[in-house]
Amino acid sequence: MVDTMSEVSVGYDHSPLNGPGLHRGDIPAPGRRLEPTAGQTPVGSKTAPRFALFAARNDKVSALAMRFPNLIDAEIRTPLDPDVILLVRPDGYVSCTAKPDDLVVVANYLDAIDAAKAVAA
C-alpha cells in the first residue's frame, strides 16, 4: 500500500528543518511523518498553520507555547509518550523531540525558526 499511495513513505531524515531528537523506536524521529490520530484535528489544518506541541500540560509547557504564539498552536496536545515532548511541523512531520524536563531543546529550535523568519522578512 505504501508504494501505491503518494508520499506515504516519504521521510526527510536529513532535512535542515529537523531539530534534535531522542532515539526511541516508538516515537517518530525528526523528519518522519506523524500519522494522524483518529478523532483529532490533523496537525496544521486550522486557519493558520502552526507547529503542534505534544506534551504533558504544565506551567513550563504553557509558557513555551505563549512565548511562540505565532509558531505553536495554542492547543497543547496529549503526549504520545509521557517521557517525550514532540514538536510537529504544520505539514505533519516531526521537527524535534526532547525529554519533558528539557524544554530548552524545543525553545532553541523555535528560536532558530523565528530568527530565520526575521532574516527573510
Image (cartoon, rainbow, N blue to C red):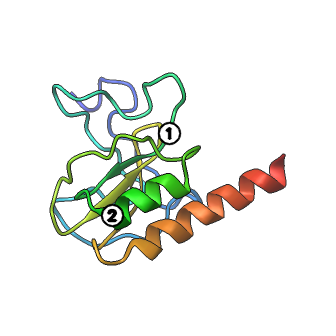
Q: Nearer the viewer, residue 42 or 8?
A: 42
Query: Alpha carbon of mark 2 to alpha carbon of mark 1: how far?
Result: 20 Å
- Is residue 85 rendered to the left or right of residue 25? right
- Which amino acid does the dot numbered 1 rest on? Arg
Q: Residue at x 38, y 57 (%)?
A: 62
- For residue 11, the mark is none
Q: Secondary structure at mark 1?
A: loop
Please indicate, yes or no, whether residue 13 appears anywhere in the rendered image.
Answer: no
| Quadrant that contains the N terminus | top left
Indicate the position of residue 88 as horizontal and vertical percent values.
40, 48
What residue do we see at 54% from left, 58% from top?
Answer: 67
Q: Identify the image quadrant of residue 87.
A: bottom left
Q: Which residue is mark 2?
A: 59
* Residue occupying image coordinates x 30% and y 44%: 34
Of 11 and 26, the residue lying toward us: 26
| Residue to which mark 1 is pinned | 50
117 w.r.t. 23: above or below: above
Residue 106 in picture, x, y percent from top left: 45, 66
Reply above or below: 26 against 88.
Answer: below
Q: Residues within 10 Å of mark 1 (few under 14, many from 20)?
A: many
Amino acid type of the residue tagged 2 in the rendering: Asp
In the visual, does 78 lie left or right of 72? left
The residue located at (29%, 31%) in the rendering is: 3
